[in-house]
Image (cartoon, rainbow, N blue to C red):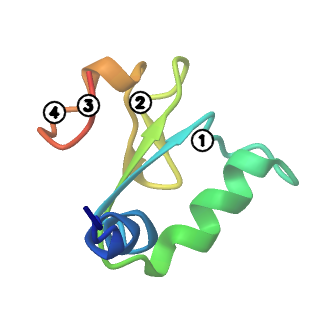
Amino acid sequence: MIVDRRPILKAMLNPKVVAVIGATEAPDSVGRTLMENLHTFAGVVYPINSKRSSVLGVKAFPSIRMVPHPSISR
């Protein structure tokens, strides 16, 4: 039996939701660069940072488990 994996691949390459674990405002950090690059992302961005309530003006969550979105794996 041949399985068509295109829908799975399409979902992986065109996400509607992105969680940035380690999002931060620290200059020259990977977490900040990711957040800056995702500012034009058409979907929802959830910054994950255990020490900040927001990152670059976006509400942050202390843990991926705290994200109130059904499509985020718990």
**Is 51 or 74 nearer to us in this picture?**
74
Q: Nearer the viewer, mark 3 or mark 2?
A: 3
CA gap between label 3 and label 1 equals 14 Å
Label 1 to label 4, Cα distance in Å?
Answer: 17 Å
Q: Are marks 2 and 1 in contact (CB under 8 Å)?
A: no
Q: Is residue 20 above or below residue 10?
A: above
Amino acid identity at mark 1: Ala
Identified at 69% across, 53% down, the residue is: 32
| Residue at figure coordinates x 40%, y 36% from the top left | 60
Q: Earlier in the sequence, mark 2 or mark 1?
A: 1
Which element carries disc 3, helix, strand or loop? Answer: loop
Mark 3 or mark 2: which comes first in sequence? 2
Choose the circle earlier in sequence order: 4 or 2: 2
Q: Which residue is mark 3?
A: 67
Q: Residue 3 in the image: x percent, y percent?
A: 28, 64
Tell me what residue is drawn at x 28 percent, y 71 percent. 4
Marking on residue 68? 4
The disc at residue 23 is: 1
Q: CA distance from mark 2 to mark 1?
A: 11 Å
Q: Residue at x 32, y 63 (%)?
A: 8
Which percent across, then down, holds residue 7? 26, 72
The residue tagged 2 is 53
Q: Name the element at disc 1.
A: loop
Task: Give whichever of 12, 34 is nearer the camera.
Answer: 12
Q: What is the spatial separation of the Cα atoms under label 3 and label 4, in whole angstroms?
A: 4 Å
